[in-house]
Amino acid sequence: MSKHYLSIEGVFKTFTRGNLSSQVLSDVNLGVERGEYISIIGHSGCGKSTVLNIVAGLIDPTEGCVILDGKEVRGPGPERSLVFQNHSLLPWLTVWENVEIAVNKVFGRSMSRAEREDWIRHNLKMVHMEHAMYKRPGEISGGMKQRVGIARALAMQPKVLLLDEPFGALDALTRAHLQDEVMRIQNDLQNTVIMITHDVDEAVLLSDRIVMMTNGPSATIGEVLKIDLPRPRERIELADDPRYNQYRQAVLRFLYEKQRNVAASA
Ligand SMILES: Nc1ncnc2c1ncn2[C@@H]1O[C@H](COP(=O)(O)OP(=O)(O)OP(=O)(O)O)[C@@H](O)[C@H]1O
């Protein structure tokens, strides 16, 4: 039995179409502890989403496996909820109904109607969206849609929350605001999170460990950096913290010195 809460064990992935095949991942191994916040960073196209989709159960590895809480991942499931960069809310439903669908699916049998309503309200409150619960996605901003997406994912009480560049499409201020919200929620709930990001500051600010991937093809984990900064973290204070800047530099060095060939050809 795996000694980690979540473990990615010897994962290889080759995509094949006709007689063309490309090996995207090669021998990816990672152990994640319960309550840990992990960021995955790496150059565009190296295979970050492929790793996340394998953990989500949306893609099968060619070799290797993912074990979550003692069980091998086989196909998607509500114990692994995903939030994408592009809001995946159903546009014809209200904010409330978008969360309700997920809650009914997971807790339809175990909670009464009143309990489910309380739970939906609680999760919308947590992301400060209770004021807009009767609006449709087309009537709210991008940042608000991401809040609802996060509320919906959290409402499923997943064992692991998978975030694929969740703030990537947002302007800098909204992004900072939402990062702070996610840190606050993380301090309260102690979720296990794996997040893909391209943003070095975001990775250092939010993570317990940053997983840095080598360039593809046949990408793997190049280095793992432990972020030993006390929580709760304050972005303004950290800007002057020498440790914060050392972590930042370590990631930048990995991306732009050790793995720079893709950056140069991009
Ligand atoms: N279904 C698929 N079929 C064939 N190739 C694929 C498929 N999905 C991904 N790939 C390829 O695998 C490689 C890694 O893609 P992936 O989306 O995992 O990278 P990424 O690091 O998340 O990229 P980005 O940062 O740009 O989002 C790319 O070369 C991509 O073209």
Image (spheres, helix red, strand yellow):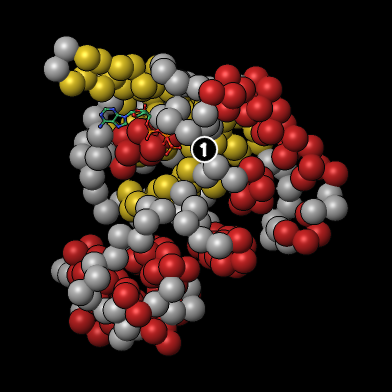
Q: Nearer the viewer, residue 104 or 234?
A: 234
Kindly tell me whether residue 191 is visible in this rendering: no
Q: Nearer the viewer, residue 206 or 140?
A: 140
- Amino acid residing under circle 1: Ile
Quadrant of the picture in which ligand 1 is shown: top left
116 vs 19, left or right, is right
211 vs 201, left or right, is left
Tell me if residue 213 comes above or below residue 56 in the rendering.
Answer: above
Can you give x and y, in whole percent of width and height, for residue 134 in the image? 31, 86
Q: Is mark 1 within 8 Å of ligand 1?
A: no
- Which residue is located at x 20 percent, y 40 percent? 75
Kindly tell me whether residue 255 is visible in this rendering: yes
Can you give x and y, in whole percent of width and height, for residue 60 in the image? 24, 30
Q: Nearer the viewer, residue 159 or 29?
A: 29
Tell me if residue 235 comes above or below residue 126 in the rendering.
Answer: above
Which residue in the rendered view is the most extreme toward the front? 265
Residue 248 lies in what quarter of the image?
top right
Can you give x and y, in whole percent of width and height, for residue 211 in the image? 55, 33
- Which residue is located at x 53 percent, y 32 percent? 42
Q: Where is the N terminus found, in terms of image quarters?
A: top left
Neighbor class of circle 1 (other Cα within 10 Å; few <14, some 14-19, many 20+) is many
User: SS at mark 1?
Assistant: strand
How many marks the image carries: the answer is 1
Give the labeled residue for mark 1. 40
Can you give x and y, in whole percent of width and height, for residue 221 in the image? 51, 24
- Which residue is located at x 50 percent, y 22 percent? 215
168 vs 148, left or right, is right
- Which residue is located at x 30 percent, y 60 percent? 88
Which residue in the rendered view is the most extreme toward the top? 19
